[in-house]
Image (cartoon, rainbow, N blue to C red):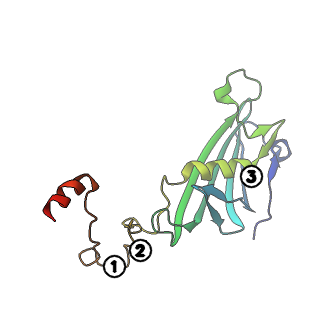
Amino acid sequence: MPAPFNTIDLTSLALKPGEASRVDADLRVAGFDLGGQSYAVEPAALPVRLDVSRTVAGHALRLRLGARLAGPCMRCLTHADVPIEVDAREVDQPGTDDEELRSPYVEDGVLDVERWVHDAIALALPQTVLCRVDCAGLCPECGISLNDVDPQTHVHERAPDPRWAKLRELQE
């Protein structure tokens, strides 16, 4: 099993321009709070693959991982387990004034892997966390899960429109 890490000193890799190194390690990632609900990133020790290539003036970085987001479905509140795949890239050229060539995750030659992983997972999250693609949610009248009942048989009597109340009084 790879050793855990949170940061990597890129200079300690001692790469010459054109050389590359691969780092495989496990990382603990904080969960996410979405819509007032808490979601965990699984597995607890997340396997992360980091490729570091030395360029003439800096580093080209690639991050790959597979994880699952676990927590309540946003429609029916049952357990949801959503797969997440990350393939992120960063470039860091410290001698340039061009912000596009500076990675926010590298400072003084040290790569903050934990922060990069957290941000990369956040960008890969789906807009809606669902237990399944066709989740029907909860009934707005009684709160029962519409995934567990036949929609043809689950009906509620509609309340009369209050705007017609005076006309109904005329009928009585």
Pointer 1 local density, CA inside 10 Å: few below 14, some 14–19, many at least 20:
few
Q: Residue at x 65, y 47 (%)?
A: 119
Q: Is residue 39 left or right of residue 54?
A: left
Q: Residue at x 67, y 29 (%)?
A: 101
Res. 51 in view:
no
**Residue lying at the far top of the rendered structure:** 97
Give above or below for 152 relative to 19.
Answer: below
Q: Residue 124: give its label.
A: none
In depth, the one of 117 and 91 nearer the eye is 117
Quarter the N terminus occupies: bottom right
Distance between the alpha carbons at the discs numbered 3 and 2 = 38 Å
Q: Position of residue 113 (x, y in %)?
A: 74, 50
Label whose residue precedes the other's in the sequence (3 or 2): 3
Distance between the alpha carbons at the discs numbered 3 and 1 = 43 Å
Q: Residue 145: give its label.
A: 2
Name the residue tied to disc 1.
Answer: 149
Quarter the C terminus occupies: bottom left
Res. 54 in view:
yes
